[in-house]
Amino acid sequence: STAVPGLAAKPIIDVMVGVRSLEEAPRVFDALAAIGYCYWPHRPWMHWFCKPSPAARTHHLHLIERRHPQFAARLAFRDYLRVHPETADAYAALKIELARKYRGDREGYTEAKAEFVHSIERLV
Protein backbone atom coordinates (compact mmCIF):
# COMPACT_ATOMS: atom_id res chain seq x y z
CA SER A 1 0.00 0.00 0.00
CA THR A 2 2.86 2.40 0.68
CA ALA A 3 3.85 1.99 -3.01
CA VAL A 4 0.48 3.33 -4.21
CA PRO A 5 0.33 7.12 -3.79
CA GLY A 6 -2.59 8.19 -1.63
CA LEU A 7 -3.64 4.70 -0.59
CA ALA A 8 -4.47 4.23 3.09
CA ALA A 9 -1.72 2.22 4.74
CA LYS A 10 -0.41 1.22 8.11
CA PRO A 11 2.56 3.35 9.17
CA ILE A 12 4.96 0.62 8.07
CA ILE A 13 7.43 0.84 5.21
CA ASP A 14 7.00 -2.35 3.19
CA VAL A 15 9.78 -3.31 0.77
CA MET A 16 10.00 -6.29 -1.57
CA VAL A 17 13.38 -7.25 -3.00
CA GLY A 18 13.76 -9.72 -5.84
CA VAL A 19 16.59 -12.16 -5.27
CA ARG A 20 18.17 -14.72 -7.55
CA SER A 21 17.66 -17.55 -5.05
CA LEU A 22 16.48 -18.03 -1.49
CA GLU A 23 19.42 -20.34 -0.90
CA GLU A 24 21.90 -17.54 -1.63
CA ALA A 25 19.98 -14.83 0.24
CA PRO A 26 21.19 -15.74 3.76
CA ARG A 27 24.54 -14.21 2.83
CA VAL A 28 22.94 -10.80 3.52
CA PHE A 29 21.26 -11.73 6.82
CA ASP A 30 24.15 -10.46 8.98
CA ALA A 31 24.23 -7.14 7.11
CA LEU A 32 20.47 -6.76 7.57
CA ALA A 33 20.77 -7.59 11.28
CA ALA A 34 23.49 -4.94 11.59
CA ILE A 35 21.00 -2.28 10.46
CA GLY A 36 18.27 -3.50 12.79
CA TYR A 37 16.29 -6.06 10.79
CA CYS A 38 15.00 -9.19 12.55
CA TYR A 39 14.57 -12.36 10.52
CA TRP A 40 11.23 -14.05 10.97
CA PRO A 41 10.49 -17.25 9.04
CA HIS A 42 7.10 -16.48 7.58
CA ARG A 43 6.48 -18.27 4.29
CA PRO A 44 8.47 -21.05 2.63
CA TRP A 45 8.76 -19.02 -0.60
CA MET A 46 10.28 -15.89 0.94
CA HIS A 47 12.62 -14.59 3.62
CA TRP A 48 10.82 -12.01 5.76
CA PHE A 49 12.34 -9.41 8.05
CA CYS A 50 10.94 -6.67 10.22
CA LYS A 51 12.37 -3.75 12.07
CA PRO A 52 12.82 -3.01 14.94
CA SER A 53 11.05 -6.13 16.32
CA PRO A 54 8.16 -8.49 15.51
CA ALA A 55 6.11 -6.84 18.27
CA ALA A 56 6.69 -3.24 17.14
CA ARG A 57 7.20 -2.95 13.39
CA THR A 58 8.12 0.11 11.39
CA HIS A 59 9.58 -1.77 8.39
CA HIS A 60 8.92 -5.03 6.57
CA LEU A 61 11.38 -6.51 4.11
CA HIS A 62 10.42 -9.41 1.83
CA LEU A 63 13.13 -11.27 -0.10
CA ILE A 64 11.41 -13.21 -2.87
CA GLU A 65 12.89 -15.02 -5.83
CA ARG A 66 12.26 -12.98 -8.98
CA ARG A 67 10.98 -16.09 -10.75
CA HIS A 68 8.41 -16.90 -8.03
CA PRO A 69 4.83 -16.16 -9.12
CA GLN A 70 4.25 -13.99 -6.01
CA PHE A 71 6.96 -11.58 -7.09
CA ALA A 72 5.18 -10.76 -10.36
CA ALA A 73 1.73 -10.91 -8.75
CA ARG A 74 2.59 -8.34 -6.09
CA LEU A 75 4.06 -5.95 -8.64
CA ALA A 76 1.06 -6.39 -10.94
CA PHE A 77 -1.34 -5.69 -8.05
CA ARG A 78 0.58 -2.52 -7.14
CA ASP A 79 0.65 -1.37 -10.77
CA TYR A 80 -3.05 -2.05 -11.26
CA LEU A 81 -3.97 0.07 -8.22
CA ARG A 82 -1.73 2.87 -9.45
CA VAL A 83 -3.67 3.18 -12.73
CA HIS A 84 -7.16 2.35 -11.41
CA PRO A 85 -7.95 4.88 -8.67
CA GLU A 86 -11.51 3.61 -8.23
CA THR A 87 -10.17 0.16 -7.39
CA ALA A 88 -7.56 1.69 -5.09
CA ASP A 89 -10.35 3.59 -3.31
CA ALA A 90 -12.36 0.38 -2.89
CA TYR A 91 -9.28 -1.39 -1.53
CA ALA A 92 -8.64 1.49 0.88
CA ALA A 93 -12.22 1.32 2.17
CA LEU A 94 -11.91 -2.43 2.67
CA LYS A 95 -8.59 -2.04 4.48
CA ILE A 96 -10.04 0.57 6.85
CA GLU A 97 -13.06 -1.62 7.60
CA LEU A 98 -10.89 -4.68 8.19
CA ALA A 99 -8.40 -2.76 10.32
CA ARG A 100 -11.25 -1.92 12.69
CA LYS A 101 -12.63 -5.46 12.65
CA TYR A 102 -9.27 -7.21 13.05
CA ARG A 103 -7.54 -4.74 15.38
CA GLY A 104 -4.56 -6.58 16.83
CA ASP A 105 -5.01 -9.62 14.54
CA ARG A 106 -2.57 -9.12 11.65
CA GLU A 107 -3.10 -12.59 10.20
CA GLY A 108 -6.90 -12.25 10.29
CA TYR A 109 -6.67 -8.85 8.60
CA THR A 110 -4.41 -10.18 5.85
CA GLU A 111 -6.58 -13.24 5.29
CA ALA A 112 -9.77 -11.14 5.16
CA LYS A 113 -8.44 -8.93 2.35
CA ALA A 114 -7.01 -11.85 0.35
CA GLU A 115 -10.06 -12.39 -1.86
CA PHE A 116 -10.01 -8.76 -2.98
CA VAL A 117 -6.31 -9.02 -3.79
CA HIS A 118 -6.81 -12.30 -5.67
CA SER A 119 -9.68 -10.83 -7.67
CA ILE A 120 -7.34 -8.12 -8.97
CA GLU A 121 -4.53 -10.59 -9.60
CA ARG A 122 -6.89 -12.60 -11.81
CA LEU A 123 -7.49 -9.47 -13.91
CA VAL A 124 -3.83 -8.77 -14.63
Image: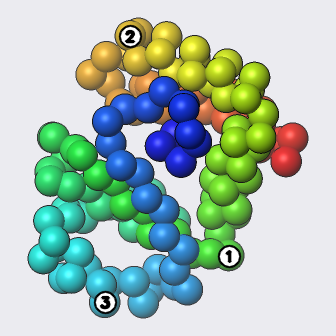
Residue 33 percent coordinates (x, y): 16, 73
- Towards the viewer: 50 or 3: 3
- Towards the viewer: 83 or 72: 83
Whether tag 2 and tag 3 are in contact, CB under 8 A, the answer is no
**Residue identified by numbered label 2:** 100
For label 2, the crowd category at 10 Å Cα-Cα, with few meaning under 14, some 14 to 19 and many 20 or more, is few
Measured along the vertical axis of the image, is residue 61 above or below residue 31?
Answer: above
| Quarter occupied by residue 67 | bottom right
Tell me the residue at 20%/64% (across/down): 37
Secondary structure beneath dot 2 equals helix
- Towards the viewer: 105 or 83: 83
The amino acid type, in three-letter code, at marker 1 is Arg
Tell me the residue at 27%/22% (across/down): 104
Residue 5 percent coordinates (x, y): 56, 39
Does residue 121 appear to the left or right of 52 in the view shown?
right
**Residue identified by numbered label 3:** 27
Does residue 52 appear to the left or right of 88 in the view shown?
left
Q: Nearer the viewer, mark 2 or mark 1?
A: 2
Tell me the residue at 16%/41% (across/down): 56
Residue 36 percent coordinates (x, y): 14, 65
Checking the image for residue 67, the label placed there is 1
For marks 2 and 1 on the same chain, the one whose residue lies earlier in the sequence: 1
